[in-house]
Amino acid sequence: MTIRKTLLRAFLMIGLVPAILLAALAFVKARAAMQEEIERNLTSQAQAVAADINKILFERLQNGATWSTLEVMQDLQVQDVDKRLSNFLAKLQSGYGGVYSRLAVLDRQRLVVASSAPHMLGQHIGQQQPWKHVTMAGAELTLERPRPGDGDTALTIAVPLTTQFSPDVWGELRLSFDWAQIDHLLDGAAGTHSMVLVDEDGTVLAASRTLRQSGMSLPGIESWHVRQRPDGAFLHDGSPLLKQQVLVGLGRAPGYGGFAGIGLSALVIEPQREALAPVQHMAEISLAILATLALLTILIARSVSGTIAQPLASLTAYTRRYKLGQDPHLVPPPAHGEVGELGEAFHQMMQEIDEARLGLVHASKLAMIGEMASVIIHEVRTPLGILRSSAQILRREAGLSIQGLELLGFIESETERLNRLVSTILDSARPRPLRLTTVDMHVLVRQTVQMLAAQLDQRQILIEKKLDATDVWVLCDSEQITQVLLNLIHNALQVLPNGGTVQITSYQSDERFMIEIADDGPGIPAMERSRVFEAFFFQREGGVGLGLAIVQQIVQAHGGEVTVDASEFGGARFIVALPHPIHNRTAP
């Protein structure tokens, strides 16, 4: 095998195999994550719908139990039935806005003696097969199964009427709840999905519009074994509802107001193909990208392998000429391939020379880079100062255009920003040794605030000083502690709007001198407070992330500590603790 073919295969392996593996892994992970999220959403939707239906049934059952005890129902006990009870039932039906298709009262012979529908008076209502028995507010209620697909679908709630003094049943109150409202509820909740409501046996009691309009006769889905499944999502053959695999979210409602429900379950159904269509689309795009990548890799690999192999072929020809005595120089051969005809001794010698040369060049570059980095950081201030001074001189020139003045402003602000950046890097990289003196901390605070007076006045920032410490003398480096105070106050100014407030407080705690700097700015989120002192961590746009790192470095060099939490104004509060205050009597 020639060197060119070897290189071509290597390039193809390196370029295509990782890409194919990564694409396959991304597809599998994305498909699994999307299916998990879809299943979670389907389950949540099913549980919410089941809870709504449970609440509706609770209200209907509670109505039946309550109305059966009303005084007007007692007319049936004394055989005093007139239009008053029918009018009362009609008003109840009207007041509930169509929730009930009809309300009726039956006597012992199961004749309709009062009804919200006058045409039902005198009709005989046969004994129906009970579906569910529910106890509500001391009343024993019987439910008759709704029959989806009938012209007048209703869930009938039968409540026995008894006297206050005897358990004998004198009649029956029948509430026909319009079951179409459950269909409408499923329509509103289904969206682009399909939804069904089933009982404990898996019989479909209601379905969303997409299934009703398809002409389906709402068959049972007992084969789905809903009763044995826990709440959650599962993959199932869509028969008899749909002719494809479907994702199903199963939800049962929790109890409501002491009502445990009647064993209904809501199913949210989505075809698996439609649910995972975005992943399939992503797979198609990935395949197109991989095909393009494969083509580009082949073209580039052919070009690169040819470029690399050509010098080796020339070197082989040169070696053959050397064998014929046409060249006085020995050319090193590789271990195999077309250049295997070259001499081993010259190969080892050239290898050692190359290694020595490369090592020397590498060491020289490292030394040069280190020296240049040290010089650049120090010397960059000089051109920055020249640029800024030149911009300030140019600003005094007459006849400058508005655009020219704006550009000069950019030069001044950017050079100042670069100068601060260099100073900050130098301070963090090479902190100088402490020069300890006895310092009046209150005087130091006032001097620091005075340094910022112009900026504070310009932005109308209020500084409140509550300097209550009595032992104000501390052994410290005044310049570095001033830098700490400047950084903390300046840090507050960067986030405060015009008219904000900064409060500086001093006190003693555990033989330490404490300084607190608080503001009423936006504050620092609790989860980020542990990172604010890390180098190069910042929240403000344009920041470097070294100011607070320098503060912590200086305070820790003094044997103290600095912490941050929320201020009483809602902003941030920095607490600086310096050790061992010196009592006034020992101060110079």
Image (cartoon, helix red, strand yellow):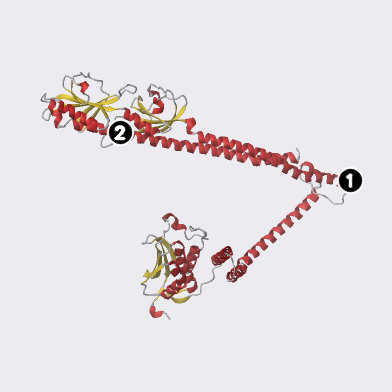
Labels in figure, total: 2
Task: Count neighbours of disc 2 (C-alpha within 10 A) and say few if under 14, some if 14 to 19, many if 20 or more.
Answer: many
Kind of residue indicated by mark 1 = Leu
Q: Nearer the viewer, residue 6 or 539?
A: 539
Q: Position of residue 403 (x, y in %)?
A: 58, 62
- CB within 8 Å, label 1 to label 2: no
The image quarter in which residue 54 lies: top left
Above or below, 324 relative to 149:
below
Q: Secondary structure at mark 1?
A: loop
Q: Position of residue 407 (x, y in %)?
A: 58, 63
Quadrant (top left/top right/bottom left/bottom right) for the N terminus: top right
Above or below, 570 relative to 434:
above
Q: Position of residue 61 (x, y in %)?
A: 24, 31
In the picture of the structure, the residue carrying the numbered disc 2 is: 54
Q: CA distance from mark 1 to mark 2?
A: 100 Å
Could you say which disc has been placed on residue 153 in the image? none
Above or below, 475 relative to 313:
below
In the picture of the structure, the residue carrying the numbered disc 1 is: 324
Label 1 vs label 2, nearer the camera: 2
Upstream in sequence: badge 1 or badge 2: 2
Asked if residue 456 lies left or right of residue 342, the reply is left
Quadrant (top left/top right/bottom left/bottom right) for the C terminus: bottom left
Residue shown at the point (41%, 79%) measured from the top left: 587
Kind of residue indicated by mark 2 = Asn
Residue shown at the point (22%, 21%) measured from the top left: 119
